[in-house]
Image: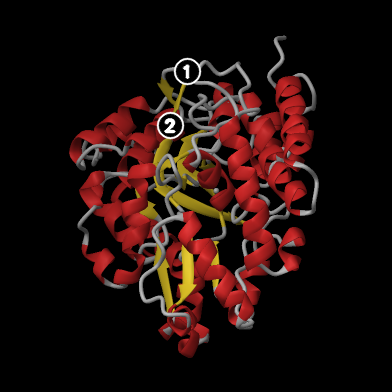
Amino acid sequence: MTTISRRGFLELAGLGAAGAVLRPQDAAAADESLTVLHESSFIKTFDEYFQKTLAPAYEKQTGVKVNYELTSVGSLPTRIGTITETGSGADATMIFGLYPFLFDEKLLDVGDIAEGAGKAQGGWYGVAKEAGIVNGKWKAVPFSNIGQLMNWRTDWFAEVGVKRFPDTWEELYEVGKKLKAKDHPFGFELGHGFGDNHGWLYPLLWSYGAHEVEPDGKTVVIDSDETARAVDFARKFFRDTMLDDVLGWTDVSNNKAWYAEQISCTNNAESILWLAKRDFPEIAQVTDQAQNPAGPKGRYHLMSAISHSIFSFTPDPQAARAFLRWLTDEKQLGGWYASADTYYQPLLHGYDNASMWQVEPRNIPYRDSLATAHLPGWPAPPNHQLAESVAKYVIVDMFAKACTGTSTKEVIKNAEAQLKDIYRPV
């Protein structure tokens, strides 16, 4: 990167089969250990399943102890940056959306594991390849998406005569006006969080036929009539349906507003319903989830990819590969997914009809959204420049500034200037 240091970038970026049967010669010596770095999960049973079931099972089978090292939410990018700079630390790591493209030189090619998983477990969703393949090589084995969809209050929508979630953005806008008039406004993040803002703004932009950069990965095309229409819609959507506070919201804000019963609709992961069922059962009863509305050019969703990578400097790459291959086997993978219900949506078609989807049928839209999900910046190929534009909130700020009253022309020109600077030839 030419404009900021890698460490500086990480501070900006808040951003998100079964292989061969394990053979004794695949594993390390009996006294060896491996460390897998993970961000602490919102669903505690997910981490517990690794600690209490997966790690002991692998040690019993191979003699290799697996240390599951947890880092706090939001700190994983910095930890990965430190490890890659020092060349020491974990052997393998959870890795988010665009980070395989930042650290590709520090990650092993895991194509044999990813391809094996795809062949054995129904094939990968197309978006999984967007997340895992860097310059033609698998640098990450995709694990899941953490989808960002519509959460809505069925009781309050019913008060204005709506029993099914609106199909289009314009229809949702009309419902939102009525709900705000009844003191049940919407709440969609427009601040500098890392998920809930991108989760609705990128799909909104795409649904109007707009995007930042062409598929060639270098031609900036944000200044378009399609972008202008998306910005104009966002301005009236904010003005007529939402709380003003959303301009300063981060990812926890809409959750708090939901449980305080201040908002009737928001864009979020499954966690809103999950926590409501645990701590706010009356709210859970009237909470439902739906795919994003469609725009003039279709319906889209954001891919918040979670994957696993192996650091190239691990002392024993063969041992790390053996473990990741074992972990990606259906026997292990299926149980790990099920431990978190469907908070982590599998990117292998073999799980499309898994029993975990029947535990809470209201979560099924998260599975169905995978067919129309993309990484931020689509249809441009993921790369360092794209990651920088996301980290600098170029698209988020374009919409947010329009909502504060800046003209459509000005916010688009500002976004274009930033993107051209980021994508300028080196």
The amino acid type of the residue labelled 1 equals Asn
User: Which mark is drawn over residue 130?
Assistant: 2
Dot 2 or dot 1, earlier in sequence: 2
The Cα–Cα distance between marks 2 and 1, rounded to whole angstroms, is 11 Å
The one of 95 and 151 positioned closer to us in this rendering: 151
Disc 1 is placed on an element classified as loop
Q: Position of residue 303 (x, y in %)?
A: 47, 44
Q: Residue at x 56, y 27 (%)?
A: 101
The local crowd at label 1, few if under 14, some if 14 to 19, many if 20 or more residues have their Cα within 10 Å, is: few
Q: Is residue 318 visible?
A: yes
The amino acid type of the residue labelled 2 equals Glu
The local crowd at label 2, few if under 14, some if 14 to 19, many if 20 or more residues have their Cα within 10 Å, is: many
Disc 2 is placed on an element classified as helix
Residue 4 versus residue 370 in the image, above or below: above
User: Which mark is drawn over residue 277?
Assistant: none
Colouring chosen for the image of the structure: secondary structure
Q: Nearer the viewer, mark 2 or mark 1?
A: 2
Left or right: where does residue 396 sit relative to residue 41? Answer: right
Q: Total of numbered circles in the picture?
A: 2
The one of 402 and 65 positioned closer to us in this rendering: 402
Q: Residue at x 33, y 55 (%)?
A: 367
The one of 50 and 55 positioned closer to us in this rendering: 50
Which corner quadrant of the image does residue 24 belong to? top left
| Quarter of the figure that contains the C terminus | top right
User: Which mark is drawn over residue 135?
Assistant: 1
Q: Position of residue 170 (x, y in %)?
A: 49, 56
Left or right: where does residue 167 sit relative to residue 245? Answer: left
